[in-house]
Amino acid sequence: MDNYDPLPDCTFGQAVARFFKKYVQFKGAASRSEFWWAFLFYFVIGIILILVGDASHVLRILVFLWDLAIVIPVLSLTCRRLHDGGFSGKLTWLVCLPVLGELALLVMCALPTRDDRWKDEWFAKTN
């Protein structure tokens, strides 16, 4: 399987491993299962850190560091998921629009694979 191909029907462990392995890879595609398992991982860790951070002001630094460390991997995964759905990865910028942009991204990420709409530049290998 090509490094740019999505992994359909991946498990939770596979999704988390690919999430960190491809943390700066904006080219390629990510299947729905790959996206949603990784999103669940990101969400649960975030909630745990927020709860821990509420116990102490000092521990809130953990939340900040987690968000800082994970922002690029989340954006790259979202970009790859948009490619799999047949959308341009540039639509990831919708995250900058409060509520409506994020909602639109969630809807687009939930749509099925549309490999008939894929563009070569989304998968072009860089040297």
Image (cartoon, grey):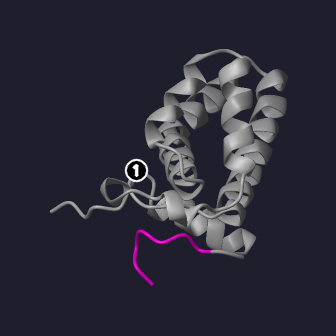
Query: Percent x, y for residue 70?
Result: 54, 41
Secondary structure that dominates the magenta span: loop
The extreme left residue here reads 127
Q: Residue at x 63, y 32 (%)?
A: 62
The answer to which image quadrant residue 103 occupies is top right
Mark 1 residue type? Phe
Is any atom of residue 40 visible in this view? yes
Identify the residue position indicated by label 1 in the image: 26
Q: Specify whether residue 125 is painted magenta.
A: no
Q: Report the side of 22 relative to 64 (left or right).
A: left
Query: What is the quadrant of the N terminus in the image?
Result: bottom left
Against 101, residue 119 (above or below) is: below
What segment carries the magenta color? 1-7
Give the residue displayed 72% in from the left and 52% down from the top: 111
Residue 42 placement, left or right of 127:
right
The outermost residue toward the front is 116
Measured as percent of width and height from the top left, residue 105 is found at: 66, 35
Q: Residue 2 magenta-drawn?
A: yes
Q: Residues within 10 Å of mark 1 (few under 14, many from 20)?
A: many
Q: Is residue 28 above or below residue 88?
A: below
